[in-house]
Image (cartoon, rainbow, N blue to C red):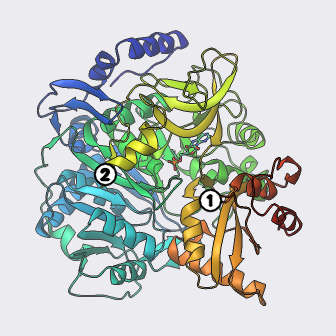
Amino acid sequence: MMLQINSLSQYQDEYRRSIEHPEQFWAEQAEHFEWHRKWHTVLKNDFITPDVRWFEGGRLNITENCLDRHIADKGDKPAIIWEPNDPTGPSISISYRQLLAQVNQCANALRSMGVSKGDRICIYMPMIPQAVVAMLACARVGAVHSIVFAGFSAKSLSDRITDTGCKWVICSDYNRRGAKDIAVKEVVDEALSLEPNLVEKVLVYKHTNKTTCWNPELDVCWQDIVPLMPEKCAPEIMDSEDMLFILYTSGSTGKPKGAVHTIGGYMVFTCFTFINTFQYKNDDIYWCTADIGWITGHSYGVYGPLLAGATTLMFEGVPNYPDAGRFWQIIDKYRVTQFYTAPTAIRSLMASAWDEPDKYKLDSLKVIGSVGEPINEEAWHWYDEKVGRGKVPIVDTWWQTENGGIMITPLPGITDTKPCYASYPLPGVQPVIVNQDGKILEGNDVEGLLCIRFPWPSVVRTTYGDHERCRTTYFAPFPGFYFTGDAARRDSEGRYRIMGRVDDVINVSGHRLGTAEVEDAINSHPEIVESAVVGFPHPIKGQGIYAYVTALHDVEDKEKLIREVLQVVTEQIGAIAKPDKIQFAPQLPKTRSGKIMRRILRKIAEGAPEQIGDTSTLINPECVQDLIDGCEL
Ligand code: PRX
């Protein structure tokens, strides 16, 4: 196994070594994998253009490292344990040997459909093992997967399919979530009707017995072809810097961009960070609740654990179905050792069923984790006391889609933990805090903008089809550094606390959304002239969405227009982007150059109008009081 840190002094030594000799450090980690040809250059470090390459010249296939490599000594070990939405339904355990066979069958099916190296394939699936099989099958044949969270609308799906030029889509017929079955295939059909002739084939896994619409020209039934394929499939041998996947994520401006991750560096970093952050041991049962549609699902639901030869639990359903004890029941049922979830889930379970964990043993847990947004102090303590029983370390892990893997986190049982603090950087991660001018703030007890000053193996390589956007978003703001978009504070002992985004990105229930995308969606309603969206503190979601909306005419039926606006946002993006509050505003506060002054709108939505400050640069300062009076809080 690759380096697993097990003491504080070892962490300090390895951290120092990883900073002083990063290439040597990461080359040693990379040695633990199977390469068809070894790299000739460990790192090409251009953090300006940017053009970062890790393990260049190396040739490999990541699925051999996730699967084939483990067969000799772990062939019968469960790779995936699947718990269905319905608690009375049968769970499924898939061994490494079975998973390899299924991936190979699916890979052969993809090849039979004409898929080859470099092709992009869109996956729009629920949390079922076939989603993992589909992902790995893409990687087996050298295709690039682009997974779209199955809660996104047909329009979002169509935009992503178009942007990546996917000619194949893999989906299910229905998704089961809680008491509802969601007709996913219908969403795919609608997406394809928005952009006809782009997609050649849709591979549909029939997850239910329900009938679904069928287009014989396009649709291929998974069950009709995949199980008939040979269980062996020669992997496509890839270059270390070939693309592994594209994952769309929101930024401050424009449409979501496709973050590109490449094979070698991502493989080494996700495996290393998995083993260390969760202090993984051979017989552990590890559970990450994130959907595979998000980066956490990619890196810590699938790639990290499988690369490490771990057993990863996959849960189809939702935390509150059939009741708010479902997570705790699953932990006891499988004797889960590491549990990794999001603050929003913790807060909602805390609000709906404070004492519910008391009914369960939860004594198998060794590490509990949090990811995706700041975990507030109250939620941290509840998680610690009710779930961890005061003796299981919490890893509050900070990282981003563009990072590929965990960057800042406590190491359980090794470094200390402190509520609200993601704490210390992992080896190879060099965070710096800078001021607005890009000057590094040295020493402790400082607060500013969080940047990373040296490439780590899974840093985003580009944004698909638009390298300039990658440069301007992450690398141009502070030349020589990767800019995270987050503010952070370093305390007197060098721990990092993430303070939240400093750009127009909001984090709603751990889902990252750009205010501009939500505004564009709202503005597509014919009655709306313009809108401005800001985040506001929300007890469960972390941040809620507050929309100020200017209508074309006097609004007679406010409720009706609100319903329509919510509908249009659901259609354009998905239900996750629906505003929590909508305030009709005849005017929005603007500067002379016509820019909306969001600072003011944020303060009103936060319920702190007394902090608005100077409004003298507005062309319409009089509207501010109207906005305060009409606030929907
Ligand atoms: O603001 C930070 C917040 O989530 C953003 C990244 O979102 P996304 O790319 O969707 O990835 C989420 C899962 C890796 C960051 O810029 N964030 C993530 N983790 C934390 C966090 N904020 C505070 N504490 C965290 N542990």
Task: Looking at the picture, tell me which residue is in the foreground, 192 or 620.
Answer: 620
Residue highlighted by disc 1: 319
**Residue 490 visible in this rendered orientation of the protein:** no
Q: Is residue 217 above or below residue 227?
A: below
How far across and down, in percent of the image, does residue 190 sit?
39, 83
Q: For the residue carrying disc 2, how many other residues have a C-alpha within 10 Å: few (<14), some (14-19), or many (20+)? A: many
**Residue 142 visible in this rendered orientation of the protein:** yes
Q: Is residue 476 above or below residue 430?
A: below
How far across and down, in percent of the image, does residue 614 sit?
81, 48
Ligand 1 has an atom within 8 Å of the beta carbon of the residue at disc 1: no
Mark toward the start of the polypeptide (1 vs 2): 2
How far across and down, in percent of the image, does residue 545 sit?
68, 62
Quote the CA–CA distance across marks 1 and 2: 28 Å
Which amino acid type is marked by label 2? Phe
Residue 245: numbered disc: 2
Q: Quadrant of residue 462?
A: top left
Residue found at x 42% / y 37%: 475
Which amino acid type is marked by label 1? Pro
